[in-house]
Image (spheres, rainbow, N blue to C red):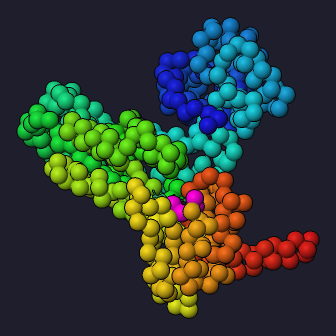
Amino acid sequence: MKYLPLFADLNERNCLIIGGGEVAAQKIRLVLGAGARLTVIATKVNNEIRGLEAAGRLRVEPSVYGSQAISKFCSSDVALIVVAEANPLDAEAWASWAHKGGFPVNVVDRPDISTVVFPGIVDRDPVLIAIGSSGTAPVLVRRLREKIEELLPSRLGRLAQFAMRFRNAVANAETNIISRRRFWEGFFDGPVARLVLKGQEHQATKAMLRIINGVGRSTPEGSVALIGVGPGDPDLLTLRALRAMQDADVVLYDRLIGDKILDYVRRDAERIYVGKAPADQSMNQQAINALILERAHTGQNVVRLKGGDPFVFGRGGEEMAVLKEASIKVEVIPGVTAAIGCAATAGIPLTHRDYAEGVSFVTGSTCDGGTEPDWASLATLRHTLVIYMGVAKAGVIGERLVEHGMRPETPVAVIENGTLPDQIIAHSTLKTLGVTVTEQCIGGPVLLIIGDVAALSREESRKADAHIERYAHAF
Ligand SMILES: C[S@@+](CC[C@H](N)C(=O)[O-])C[C@H]1O[C@@H](n2cnc3c(N)ncnc32)[C@H](O)[C@@H]1O
């Protein structure tokens, strides 16, 4: 993150705007809107600025430079300097002078010499949304702003003010911090908020008073959401997962949950890493179950994030059973399992009328020394076999399936870090699987897709390579 978004309090603070044309006027509207005391330094100003001067909203001074301007117009208390429409040399001089004096400076269209930049703003005062692209794509920011403008109700600011009016009353009625947050979560999703957004504030006030007077003071009931977050790409999160992640008080996550997914968790939620790498037994399943129970008993919304889907090789069933046993409310939110996500991104149809009648999800790692999968039966099915957690035994798996009758040339796609930017897809066969895995895999999670459908992906990538080659020759 190159810029940290902050909201500046400019009320009654001195600001300088250098320039008197349309670009300067745009910035002046914003800065005046924030209540700043404004001096415009320009030899010539447009009608809008002249009108604002006549109305006593700002003053216009002919060109002076740097420290002269400061001592003349605003002592050393300058909260912001905006350089708009100066010639490039003047702009650089202003910027370098501001840097020396330690004043925040924005030079329009010159993020390289600015210390602050103006974001795109969606204004539902007092609710404000600032959008930035670190100076890389102002047009994209504008498009995003338009989209957000469409999404947000016009009376959102009224809703925030309405909530503000009742803040103390709710705090007095709900002394428990968790209950209070629940109250507000329910409020913003509920009928009173809808009345405010429809402009019916009188009815909303009456309804709100009724609710506050009836509010109980009991300890809130805790709950647990077992959430499948998919194989890694955050775009594969479901809407339901996003909502639950935003309601979390505490989040338990393990090794395969990346930062990009954690970015969607409510910012104030506590985050607890519970490990669970194959070699990392720092927190075993019993300890995780105990922690979930303990947090839910204190009334927290516990979110347990799981890669892929919680019920596919995710031990979600065990966690759910423990919670049900303890009468804790539990919701299971499905996720895109690695097989589905990886197959889609690799272009492999897991079933196909010409090649596979079905698909079997199989674990390559036997649980706590349990029995091996029934390779003999799996080899006779006309199924695509998707092997989870099989990388360490890939060579043996290939041998077993061949021993039980599958062709040694049966295609295998080895997919590592599927759906992520560093995804690797290696094409192999049952005969060469062990070697491929040793040579190609670098340590991320790996899925093996075994069956004739795996060759379709190889065919597609060959065609793509050929196309790129032809295209390259044309130039
Ligand atoms: C403990 S299992 C969890 C499976 C998860 N519940 C699911 O539905 O995908 C972990 C295994 O899933 C597979 N896996 C998970 N994410 C993957 C990814 N992005 N790319 C390839 N394989 C992945 C790997 O085989 C990994 O060893």
Q: Is residue 106 left or right of residue 375?
A: right
Q: Examine the rendered structure and indicate whether residue 397 appears above or below residue 78.
A: below
Q: Examine the rendered structure and indicate whether residue 151 appears above or below residue 167.
A: below
Quadrant housing the C terminus: bottom right
Residue 366 in picture, x, y percent from top left? 44, 61
Residue 448 visible in image: yes
Q: Examine the rendered structure and indicate whether residue 154 appears above or below residue 342.
A: above
Which residue is drawn at the image coordinates 38% and 35% (left, top)? 270
- Quick check: is 312 in the magenta stretch? no
Which residue is drawn at the image coordinates 26% and 38% (left, top)? 295
Which residue is drawn at the image coordinates 23% and 47% (left, top)? 223
Q: Is residue 410 left or right of residue 250?
A: right
Q: 320 or 125, which is in the foreground? A: 320
Q: 24 or 1, which is in the foreground? A: 1
Residue 88 in picture, x, y percent from top left? 83, 32
Residue 205 visible in image: no
Quadrant housing the N terminus: top right
Residue 363 in picture, x, y percent from top left? 46, 65
- Residue that sits furthest to the left in the current view: 214
Q: Examine the rendered structure and indicate whether residue 414 appears above or below residue 218.
A: below
Which portion, as a residue range, is magenta? Answer: 388-392
- Tell me how many marks there are: 0
Which residue is drawn at the image coordinates 75% and 77% (left, top)? 462
Residue 45, picture quadrant: top right
Q: Is residue 180 left or right of residue 474?
A: left
Q: 26 or 156, which is in the foreground? A: 156
Residue 287 in picture, x, y percent from top left? 32, 40
